[in-house]
Amino acid sequence: MISEIFQLEFMLRAIYAGLLVSLSCGVLGVFVVLRKQAFIADGVAHASLAGIAIGLLLGSNPILWAIAVAIVMSILLTYIKQNSNVSFDSSIGILYSFFFAVGILVISAIDSYKPDLLSFLFGSLLSITWIEVVYALALLIFVAIFIAVTYSKIVYMTFDIEGARVRGVNVKLLEYVLNILVSIAVIVSIKLMGVVLVTAMLVIPATFAKLFAKNFSQVIWFSCIYAIIATTLGIILSYILDLPSGAMVVVLHTVLLGFLVLMKAIRGR
Amino acid sequence: MKEQIVLKDVEFKYLNSVVFAGINLKINKGDYIIITGGNGSGKSTLLKLILGLIKPSKGLVKTESRKIISANVGYVSQSNNIDKEFPITVEELIHLECNVSSKTCSLSPEIHLAKFNAEHLINKKIAELSGGELQKVLICRAFVTEPEILILDEPTNNLDKIARQNLYKLLMDLNNQGKTIINVTHAHDEHGYSFKNAISYDLVNGKLVEEVHND
């Protein structure tokens, strides 16, 4: 059964995409969780419905439209955070409701039934194309370069934003780039995970890493390794059990986290 | 005497209410400035203006270099501003300061921690530290790049008597080496230590009032 999986092209595409987005989300998720901004992933994923709907309506690539909406949303969120007293959670709540509502209005304008829409909402292994694997690879390259170049500054900013500003770190620019990359990571993961479940890819591995790592260097590695293992197993199980990939991956991520936390608690007694 | 920081007729408003106004302050290289005041008097806000983190509603904040936000400042903020559950070790935290600063760190983190008898904390995560231990680490972090100006916001918070004494001995040594120190505090702890050019101010009712001037 397992060897059969690796001979199926659509499964190979799904596994490659899963590995690549696991690495991107594993790294970015650490900063999302430590900056206490987990809601941004959920907000961007829901807002992306507007882009997906526009893409379906126009007959062009919905993922590219979703990326465009996600970038606009992340720029607006960052601008509001840096220039107003509106809380970050509130601005996410306002903007994602707006974009989601636009998405619903656009979908209602589409005459025919769009089966693609379900794969965006809940994730589907069959719907992942080589182009999306390339998007995932491009994202990983951008994330790797960004983190390598700004590592100390972004860790400092995440720990102590005021101290980072005193040290001359360009906090405003870093926040924009980080939020844009997180938004793109969310969209690139949507075909695998679905709009409603994609947050798990950013939040669960990083939460595991925060709980188990002995130092910050370990946090990033632990988050990536956890994401790769749980996502790959989730994809394989979803094929074997013939269940939706997004739901299977999230269930596996969560059950694994619960099991490890329980084991830690028992060993700590 | 070379002026490093000048505040000229500075006013700061928050939500349309005046926190302080008419603040005039000249800080020369090697000064030891103490600013006291009650809760909510605007002491921390005044420091943030000096650091360039916020802008005055009126007046001028001039610093020696065009940007005081540079490698020349060591800043100890109030520790309640940081995430105490952040998964980072003391050693990583201090290395981070060196990596972000444009100045190199000539001494190892252990040597700085040893000044507070805290070298044993080097491999601990900050979540494992007590309030006092964390404060010692944050003070060491500010000193590690050997900055020319030290800006301290309630640095003795959570510190026991011995740690407070160690801190003031260290500040006195640094002041004697010509470092400028601005110390915002609730109470004068520095009795018994001789600082060069010590000037004490009280921030009361939105005005900065000079108290004592010891040459």
Image (cartoon, rainbow, N blue to C red):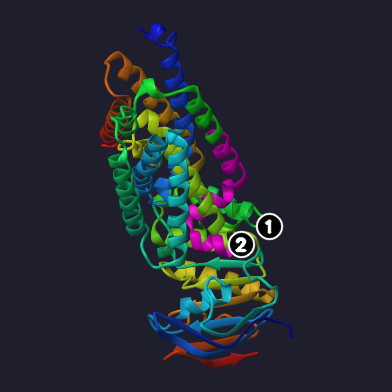
Picture coordinates of residue A154, whole percent (x, y): 54, 50
**Is residue B13 depicted above or below A53 in this figure?**
below
Q: Residue drawn at (54%, 58%), measured in percent from left and top?
A: A171
Q: Do the CB atoms of the residues marked 1 and 2 lie less than 8 Å apart?
A: yes
Q: Which mark is residue B163?
A: none
Q: Sort mark 1 into few (<14), some (14-19) or many (20+) by Cα contacts within 10 Å.
A: some
* Residue located 58% across and 49% down the image: A152
- Amino acid at pointer 2: Gly
| Res B133 quadrant in image | bottom left
* Residue B140 seen: no
Q: Is residue A206 above or below residue B143?
A: above
Give the residue drawn at x 36%, y 62%: A87
Q: Chain of mark 2?
A: A
Q: Magenta stretch?
A: A140-167
Judge by depth and name the residue closer to the eye, B123 or B23. Answer: B23
Task: Name the spot of residue A168 as percent of width and height, x first.
Answer: 61, 62
Amino acid at dot 1: Ser
Q: Secondary structure at mark 2?
A: loop
Toward the right, the furthest residue is: B1
Q: Nearer the viewer, residue B35 or A191?
A: A191
Picture quadrant of residue A193: top left
- Tell which tag, 1 or 2, sits nearer the viewer: 2
The x, y position of residue A261, in whole percent, is 29, 35
The chain identifier of the residue carrying mark 1 reads B
Q: Position of residue B19 (x, y in %)?
A: 43, 85
A162 drawn magenta: yes
Which quarter shows the C terminus of chain B? bottom right
Q: Which residue is mark 1?
A: B102
For label 2, the residue is A168
